[in-house]
Image: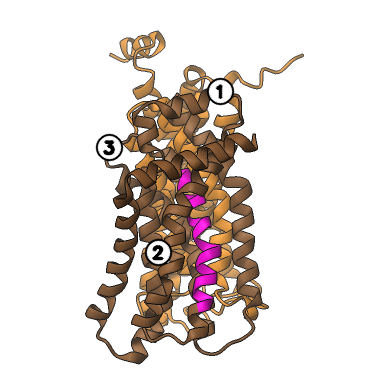
Amino acid sequence: MFKAFCCIVMRDLTLAMRRRTDVLTTLFFFIIVVSLFPLGTGTEKVILQKIAPGVAWVAALLASMLALERLFASDFADGTLEQLLLTPQPLFVLVLGKVLAHWLLTGLPLVLIAPLVGLQYYLPNDAVITMMLALLIGTPVLSLIGAIGAALTLGLRGGGILLSLLILPLYIPVMIYGAGVVSASAIGTTDLQAYFSILSGFLILALVLSPIATAAALRISVE
Amino acid sequence: MSINWFKYSSPATFYPLAGKMIPFFGWLTAILMAGGLYWGFFETPDRLSDQKEYYRIIYIHVGAAWMSMWLYIMMAAWALAGLVLQTRLSFMIAKAIAPTGAIATFLALWTGAFWGETSWGTWWDWDPRMTSELILLFLYMGYMALQSAIDDPRRADRAAALLALVGLVCVPIIFWSINCPDPNECAALHQTSNPGGGNMEPNILIAMLVTALAFWMYSFVAILMRVRNIILERERHTTWVKELLEKNK
């Protein structure tokens, strides 16, 4: 079972490495969205510091959501997905493998690029480190929840827009606490334990429930 | 004697049953609504604490808000029943509930905006309850959008049902996190916007409960009518629908 999991992760990573632009597109989408806000709101330091956590998180939500469409689409198109559904290994393990690979390609780069946001928005160093930690815990939740939506909208006309309608409301809790912890850290609060506990709680809950729901959704969509 | 619990789970037997239930709930709606509004307008004081006549929007607002939440739970419950028991009718009922729930949610937001404008001086405030209600509207919209985006009714039903269940798991978490954005200061979840059922004028409370009940009965009417339409649309190739149409010609 674990072998199948590793096999799926390696396969998806290899496929992505053959087409590197897909990964870079998501990353640059995030950078562009984050860079556009100061042009719209004015570049005053106080305002930017205030909106930085929210902007970074909304940009992260949108970036991870845009990338979701590709999670199952190409496997669905070439028939690989049907073969995955027929394998003797439990489907949720394979789903978890695909989500992990997807997060490594779209979530992790966002975590690593976060210091750039800190520079652009004049955030203190502590807040930048907090933001990276929050993104590290939060972005896997986004990928996990999003996988359910990606499976439900598989092969539909206008799937991308529909996906955003289904998934964005479910992202709200992660965004509230993810942005909340950065704001708290930016104004100098040191006791951030509660935020990280809640975010980790979301991650555990999503890890347990989402692969099962995604597997069920895939069976509904492909049958 | 054995009871056939699934007698009415077939669309063919449920269709006439729903037809018989609609007038019953319809009259109940009319009587309760008329009675509740009469009581609310003529038997109650002109003021509720510091609010003047305009507080009477409560008779629409509270009923709509309660129904919006209750109908989402019911929609998810029928969706679950459909997924577990594989009954087509359950999915049809879940599908029929969604528009009524969305309308109730919209009505709650709309009347809330008017009430807010008169009592707080603002149409919209990022108050936790209002935000939660807005998110609920998004969830209903997502359900209906997914349902209508899929052509195959079997897949549409099951996909939307799964979405409703995922939503049901997320709803408490979403509402809780909106209520309490700072986890370090979360001792009190109580809000000032709550008029407080305990110290409310009894006549106002009675009128409010009666109109809320009327909203509930109205939901039965609207949902049953919509279920009948969905049944006819989906079962149009079956012989019993054709016979029904022949009879009514």
Q: Residue A19 carries which label?
A: none
The residue closer to the viewer here, A129 or B2, is A129
Direction right: furthest residue: B1
Question: At 49% across and 85% down in the image, what residue appears?
Answer: A125
Reading the image, the residue beneath label 1 is B9
Question: At 39% across and 8% down in the image, what residue appears?
Answer: B239
Quarter of the image that includes the N terminus of chain B: top right
- The chain identifier of the residue carrying mark 3 reads A
Q: Where is residue A122 in the image (x, y as percent from the top left)?
A: 38, 87
Amino acid type at circle 3 is Arg
Direction left: furthest residue: A39
Calculate the distance from the C-alpha at mark 1 to the C-alpha at mark 2.
45 Å
Reading the image, the residue beneath label 2 is A60
- Please report the bounds of the magenta region as a residue range: A129-148
Q: Is residue B128 left or right of residue A37?
A: right
SS state under label 2: helix
Reading the image, the residue beneath label 3 is A157
Was residue A145 drawn as part of the magenta stretch in this picture? yes
Q: Position of residue A50 (x, y in %)?
A: 40, 85
Amino acid type at circle 2 is Ala
